[in-house]
Amino acid sequence: MIRTNKLVSFLEENDLDGILIHNPANIFYYSNFKGTSGSLLMTKTLNYLITDFRYVDQAKASAIDFEIVETDTIETIDIAINKLRKKHKLYKLGLEGDVISRNTWLDYEKKLTSRLVNVNIDHLREIKDQKEINLIKKAIEIAETAFLDTLNKIKIGMTEKTVARILEFKMLELGAEAIAFNTIVASGSRGALPHGVASDKLIAKNELITIDFGCVYKGYCSDITRTFAIGKIDEKLLEIYDIVLQANKLGIKTLAANQKACYVDQVVRDFISDNGYGDNFGHGLGHSFGIEVHENPRLNQISNKTLQSGHLLTVEPGIYVSGLGGVRIEDDVLILDDGIEVLTSLNKELIILEEENV
Ligand SMILES: [Mn+2]
């Protein structure tokens, strides 16, 4: 109900009679409906879930606070809405311009008798409630358990893809409903690719391996990165590991309610620059996540957000050296009124798998 109340406040503040929601993350957030076709029409007093024949039973079972409106095809949503418009005086209707295509917008404009206003309501999901935190904690626990299991199974000569599949299968076996994103397994010089999705490269000795992974549990994501080693590692990479580890700890220590998001990024960026790798950290320090794996607020140089209790953030500094490799260490942290809670619990000191055991 708190979620709906916040949306109603948004409608009031923006002088809207209702909103037609298409973003699947927002549909799930308000209605608990996860079907891939449907939209919500929410007014200050009534909630409708508009979907087609394929999803009606699922909608009735999951979206218990919503009246289900069945349409024949996507084209007839407008007929349903225009009917509802008469009942609810929907003169001004919010529509998520960041989510629907231009053609869909034009189509609505042609067919709906309401005036359409471009809105984005994603920020209403920024502060996580206890129920969400509990699901995210479970998604993290599953991912971490699967990661430790994968460390025991990794073998020299496997492809990065095989390592990714072992980790993903374990997450699913442990109760995850899906993986949160394409698992990154970047070994050796591929470690210099911040988004090096697992490839056919073979796992080799004397290399670092960065794995960035996460799963979805009951609609909520986890997002974790660890870099570990097999055998003997180049001195320069060991130095880089140590800098990234310190940067990660510094970022976590700097997080607090009332802190500016850009300031936290700057503190860590300055630290990495002071250690000589300023040009090798080309992405933001972190981001929020929840129903989606990348949500606001962001920890980066242009984020003017002030952190608040209930914000959930990744802290993921990385150093990437083309031709040599890279390191990233990513934790998930919850901002509290009087401090923080680090939700990830995997060891961060460099894990070195002995060559003869791999
Ligand atoms: Mn991340």
Image: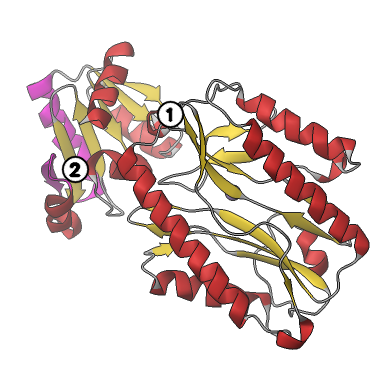
The quadrant in which the C terminus is found is bottom right
Mark 2 and mark 1 lie on one chain; the one further toward the N terminus is 2
| Above or below for 54 versus 20 | below
Check residue 87 for magenta coloring: yes
Name the residue carrying label 2.
Answer: 50
Name the residue nearer the viewer: 40 or 271: 271
Residue 187 picture quarter: bottom right
Q: Which kind of residue does numbered mark 2 sit on?
A: Ile
User: Does mark 2's beta carbon lie closer than 8 Å to ligand 1?
Assistant: no
Across and down, in percent, residue 68 comes to 12, 44
Check residue 47 for magenta coloring: no
The residue depicted at 39 percent of the width and 36 percent of the height is 128
Name the residue nearer the viewer: 239 or 84: 239
Name the residue nearer the viewer: 109 or 70: 70
Q: Is residue 148 visible?
A: yes
Name the residue carrying label 1.
Answer: 123
The residue depicted at 86 percent of the width and 60 percent of the height is 237
Which element type, helix, strand or loop, lies under badge 2? strand
Residue 111 picture quarter: top left
User: Going by the image, does 220 lie left or right of 147?
Assistant: left
Q: Which kind of residue does numbered mark 1 sit on?
A: His
The residue depicted at 11 percent of the width and 21 percent of the height is 88
Q: Which residues are magenta?
A: 63-88
| Above or below for 243 versus 235 | above
The residue depicted at 15 percent of the width and 47 percent of the height is 71
Of marks 2 and 1, the one in the foreground: 1
| Above or below for 34 versus 208 | above
User: Going by the image, does 189 lie left or right of 12?
Assistant: right
Residue 109 picture quarter: top left
Across and down, in percent, residue 153 comes to 60, 82
Q: Is residue 303 visible?
A: no
Across and down, in percent, residue 70 comes to 13, 47
